Amino acid sequence: MANNGVPVDIKKLRLARLRKGWTVRDVSQRCRELGTPVDFGAYSRYERGLTDPGPGRLLAIARALDLTVDELLDGAA
């Protein structure tokens, strides 16, 4: 990625969301409820591999999806 974010495994990210039966907007809303707003457009870009989330947003996404940050990291990075 051409940013300073934390590389995530986009397949794991998408699969975790789908297992919950959530939309991208649902993840965004849950992050907001947990105290860290993550715009649904930004989340969509993370999931498509267009950009990577910063550490704070990655933590919020992991919490929203009931995962650890380690479970979302891209091991190839």
Image: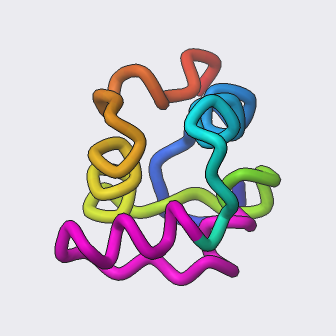
Which residue: 72% across, 66% down? 44
Q: Which residues are magenta?
A: 26-45
Which residue: 25% across, 74% down? 33
Point out the image quarter for the N terminus. Answer: bottom right
Instruction: Kindly give the residue lying farthest to the front in the view shown.
Output: 21
Instruction: Kindly give the residue lying farthest to the left in the view shown.
Output: 35
Overall secondary structure of the magenta stretch? helix
State the image quarter where residue 55 is shown.
Answer: bottom left
Question: Colour mode?
Answer: rainbow
State the image quarter where residue 67 is shown.
Answer: top left
Point out the image quarter for the C terminus. Answer: top right
**Is 5 left, or right, of 62 in this rendering?**
right
Residue 41 lies in the magenta stretch: yes
Residue 74 vs residue 27, the one in the foreground: 27
Which residue: 42% across, 21% down? 71
Number of numbered tags placed on the structure image? 0
Residue 34 vs residue 9, the one in the foreground: 34
Residue 67 lies in the magenta stretch: no
Residue 48 vs residue 16, the one in the foreground: 16
Give the x, y percent position of residue 12: 63, 27
Question: In the rendered image of this protein, does residue 44 appear above or below residue 60?
Answer: below
Question: In the rendered image of this protein, does residue 12 appear above or below residue 75?
Answer: below
Give the x, y percent position of residue 49: 77, 51
Give the x, y percent position of residue 29: 44, 75
**Is 4 left, or right, of 52 in this rendering?**
left
Question: In the rendered image of this protein, does residue 33 appear above or below residue 57?
Answer: below
Give the x, y percent position of residue 63: 28, 45
Which residue: 35% across, 81% down? 37
Residue 36 vs residue 3, the one in the foreground: 36
